Image (cartoon, rainbow, N blue to C red):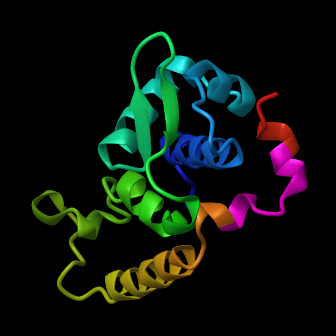
Amino acid sequence: MRLTIRTNLAMRTLMFCAVNAGRTVRKHEVAEACNASENHLAQVIHLLAQKKFLRTVRGRSGGLTLGRPAETITVGEVFREFESVLPFTECSEGAENRCPLVGACRLKCVLDDALRAFYAELDRVSVADLVTGNCELQTLLKVA
């Protein structure tokens, strides 16, 4: 299992905004600090704003901030928004499922349980938990 680049960038962006709380940050600052393409980051920011994780302001003095307090944004919530569009297994694809074992296979149930446990663990961690007291991360992401 590996996270998509979009999910990874979403978490980096949220952490960047959390470290720079109280300040409107610019996309190019996030891209530079997170070693990301501004074009790719723009797509991620758009989805984060649609889902109310971020608040964006257009224009000359525009930028982005967290859409709500970092303590209320869980890693599980973000992962679900970004990762759930991709089925974990073929048998989770519904009508597109071509697996000949679907009627007898118990693996789907095991994987469903594992995914629930995975997301339950991620739900226990907020963006604030990732940045609070993390001096090394704050040094990397803090805008001067």
Q: In percent of the image, x 78 and y 37: which residue is there?
A: 142
Residue 24 position within the rendered picture, expressed as x and y whole percent measured from the top left: 57, 31
Residue 57 position within the rendered picture, expressed as x and y whole percent measured from the top left: 41, 26
**106 is within the stretch colored magenta:** no
Q: Is residue 31 above or below residue 78?
A: above
Q: Residue furthest left?
A: 95
Q: Is residue 43 visible?
A: no
Name the image quarter holding residue 94: bottom left
Q: Residue furthest top?
A: 60
Nearer to me, 26 or 118: 26
Name the image quarter holding residue 29: top right
Residue 51 position within the rendered picture, expressed as x and y whole percent measured from the top left: 32, 49
* Quadrant containing the C terminus in the rendered view: top right
Q: Is residue 129 above or below residue 26?
A: below
Nearer to me, 67 or 125: 67
Q: In percent of the image, x 41 and y 87: which residue is there?
A: 113
Q: In percent of the image, x 69 and y 33: which residue is there?
A: 34
Q: In percent of the image, x 33 and y 81: which residue is there?
A: 108
Q: Tell me which segment is drawn in magenta.
A: 129-138
**130 is within the stretch colored magenta:** yes
Dominant secondary structure of the residues highlighted in magenta in the image: helix
Looking at the image, residue 110 sits to the left or right of residue 144; the answer is left
Q: Is residue 22 visible?
A: yes
Looking at the image, residue 16 sits to the left or right of residue 68; the answer is right
Residue 81 position within the rendered picture, expressed as x and y whole percent measured from the top left: 36, 56
Name the image quarter holding residue 129: bottom right
Picture mark count:
0
* Quadrant containing the N terminus in the rendered view: bottom right
